[in-house]
Structures are given as structure tokens and as C-alpha cells.
Image: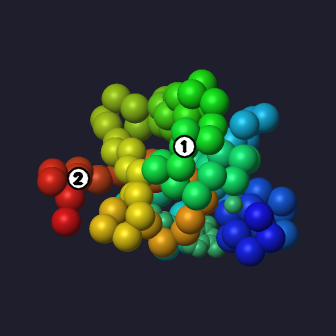
Amino acid sequence: MPDCLFCKIIAGEIPSARVYEDDQCIAFDDISPQAPTHILIVPRQHIESLDKADGMDRSSVGHLLLAAASIARDKGFAESGYRVVINTNEDGGQTVFHLHIHLLAGRPFVFPPG
Ligand code: 5GP
Ligand code: ZN
């Protein structure tokens, strides 16, 4: 998608601090971290949101979540804990319309979120 920020990051047209990548997804540091660790996991395929994820293989959606868990283990915060978030559409607080998982760690989180 030519005007999509995350497609540009995937293509390397906009720089990012990549922490993980494979054939289906990439992960990079959020530019405005909301926790000591704040990573975005993004499918290479342009899908607007979780609401449109019917357009993906089911296994690809699962792959994103398992990538988040794998990154958490690799970075050493799986045991202490972390939070994954998928903001979806306006009320969900989504601002970039290319599906992504937020992986947050390094501090306690409250529930429910604001
Ligand atoms: P959303 O609000 O859609 O759930 O999350 C979008 C996230 O993308 C936000 O946390 C925001 O800080 C992050 N973001 C926006 N622009 C950029 C950018 O150019 N680079 C990186 N690394 N993150 C970005
Ligand atoms: Zn995109």
C-alpha cells in the first residue's frame, strides 16, 4: 500500500529499529514507547486491522501472536510478564491502519486499560 506508514517501514523506505523479522512479519521499536519495552509486530501483508483479518490465513494471525511470545522469551521478560494489545478502529484507539500487535513490558500494567 503506497501510502501506508508500516508498508514503508517494511520496505525499508522509512527507518526503524528492527528487533525481529521472518518471512511473515517484522517487529520494531515503537517510536513513542509507552513502557520501557514497546515493540510493534507487523505482518508483511497489508491488512488494515484485526477487523479485516479474515483476509489473512488463520495461521498467519496466529503466527503474529506466537512471534510476540517468542520475542518476549528472547528478550528475557516472558517470566516477569508483558502485555499484548491490538487497538482496532476508532474506539479501540487505532491510529495506523496496518494491523499490528503492541508488545509492552518492563513495568506493571493496570487492567482495565484507559
Ligand atoms: P496504534 O495507535 O495504531 O495502535 O499504534 C500505532 C503505533 O505506531 C503508535 O504506538 C505509534 O507510536 C507508532 N508509530 C507511529 N509512527 C511511527 C513511526 O514512524 N515509526 C515507529 N517505529 N512507530 C511509529
Ligand atoms: Zn500497510
Could you tell me residue 33's position as x and y percent? 45, 67
Secondary structure of the residue carrying tag 1 is helix
CA–CA distance between discs 2 and 1? 27 Å
**Residue located 40% across and 32% down the image:** 78
Which image quarter holds the C terminus?
bottom left
Q: Which badge, 2 or 1, comes first in the chain's sequence?
A: 1
Residue located beneath label 2 in the image: 109
Q: How is the image coloured?
A: rainbow
The quarter of the image that holds ligand 2 is bottom right
Is residue 60 shown to the viewer in this render?
Answer: yes
Could you tell me residue 75's position as x and y percent? 52, 38
Q: Amino acid at mark 2?
A: Phe
The vertical placement of 37 against 57, above or below, is: below
Q: Amino acid at mark 1?
A: Ala
Give neighbour class at mark 1: few <14, some 14-19, many 20+ (Cα, 10 Å): some
Is residue 40 shown to the viewer in this render?
Answer: no
Compare residues 42 and 83 and report the one nearer the observer: 42
Residue located beneath label 1 in the image: 53
